[in-house]
Structures are given as C-alpha cells and as structure tokens.
Amino acid sequence: MREIDYDEMIARLRDEFEVGAYPGKNPEDDEIPTRSPFKVLISTVLSQRTKDINTHRASEALFSEYETPKELAEAPLEEIKDLIEPSGFYNVKAERVKRIARRIHEEFDDQVPEDLRSLLDFKGVGRKTANCVLVYGFGEPAIPVDTHVHRISNRMGIADTEDPEETEKILEEEIPKRFWIEINKLMVEFGKNICQPRKPKCERCPLTDMCWYYEEVYVDEDR
Ligand code: SF4
C-alpha cells in the first residue's frame, strides 16, 4: 500500500475542484443545492448508468410533480416513467423509485432512514447509493465508491482491488475520517476531468508525485 499524505492530496484536489460532483446536480451549475435525503436517494437511483445531465433532467422533472415520499408512492407508474425518461432504463427505475417511496412512506413515516443497513434493504440500493445518501443527504461521513473512485484509488496505488466494495474498505482504513465526506465529490470531478477512464491526462494532474500509475506506467510510456 502506498503512503500518501492525505492532507496534501485533498488540499490539491480542493484547489482544482472546489464544487465537485453530486447526484442529480446540473453539470453546468457551480452551486451544490441543498437537498433532502429523499431527493438524494431518488436522484442517485436515477443516476445509475446514465450521464449527469440526464440524471439532472429526470430528477428535476420528477420532483416538479412529486416531491415527497407519499406523493411519489401514490403517483401513476406510467407518469413516473414519462417524467424520468431522460435517465434511461426508465421502466425499471420507475418501479424502483415508486417502491422505495412507498416503503419510506409506509414503514418509515416519510423519513429516509439514516443508517446504512436500512438503506441497503431497499431494492435497487447498493452501497454506493446508500453511502451517497449518508454523505449528500445527511452530511454523515461515508465513502461512496463509484467507478471513478474505484479507478483512481487503484491507479494511484491507494488500493489494489477488484471491486468497489473492497476499495471502500481500504479507503476507510487509509483515509482519515475528516476527509470522508468530500472524497467522493472530489474524486468524481477529478475522474471526469483529469484521471479519465481510458486515457488519464497525467500531464495536467496535480497528483503525479503521489501516483503509482504515473511512476510505473505513464513515465515509461513517455520514454
Ligand atoms: Fe490519474 Fe495520471 Fe494523475 Fe495518476 S498521474 S492520478 S493516473 S491523472
């Protein structure tokens, strides 16, 4: 495992990506809106396998008509499908969000539960989505590991893992808890702009001196 100065790493990422990403956020907006845990949960489900702008459009359309768990639980399924169509996979996603809303309304008194185990019990909610709700909905320290966080952690040498769940465990061990809340938004933005999936832009990266890939692969390729 690589020794990394996380104070320094986070400071450099903060310098470049002050705002960061956020499920359902308008990619063209510089502001991160305050959102209820319910909206974060639904937006994160809608964000699965689609682009940010599509998640944003679908979320805005849905919440303009149905804002609360009760309203969404009682909404006609076909109408939900129409509203969230921009997010893709809208048949499955419409059923998911309606079912989640119904359980929150009926079993949790319209309040999204604030613990990981209860969140994971909702169909269609995995660890990434549940951790997003904790971080972006409740302001609780957690590390949502999506494809960007997983890839960057492995490229840098922080983790040497096959799947995001293992990466989450390593990151929780390695990264001081005071940084957990912002790791996802910083790494996601970093992954979209610099440490991109196919070809990382190492020449523009502020973290080269901390990165395994840069030392072992990029520099050699460049020779
Ligand atoms: Fe990613 Fe390259 Fe930066 Fe390493 S040096 S974190 S591979 S962009």
Image (cartoon, grey):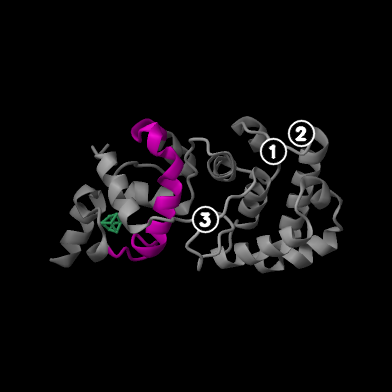
Compare marks 1 and 3 and give the one earlier in the sequence: 3
Q: Distance between the residues labelled 1 and 3?
A: 21 Å
* Mark 1 element type: loop
Report the residue marked by disc 2: 108
Residue 143 in the image, given as x and y percentages of width and height: 47, 40
Main structural element of the magenta stretch: helix, strand or loop?
Answer: helix
Quadrant placement of the N terminus = top left
Q: In which quarter of the image is residue 137?
A: top right
Q: Distance between the residues labelled 2 and 3?
A: 27 Å
Judge depth for marks 2 and 3 and give the one in front.
Answer: 3
Residue type at the position of mark 1: Val
Find out whether the residues at labels 2 and 3 contact each other: C-beta distance under 8 Å. no
Quick check: which quadrant has ligand 1? bottom left
Report the residue marked by disc 3: 32
Residue type at the position of mark 3: Ile
* Mark 3 element type: loop
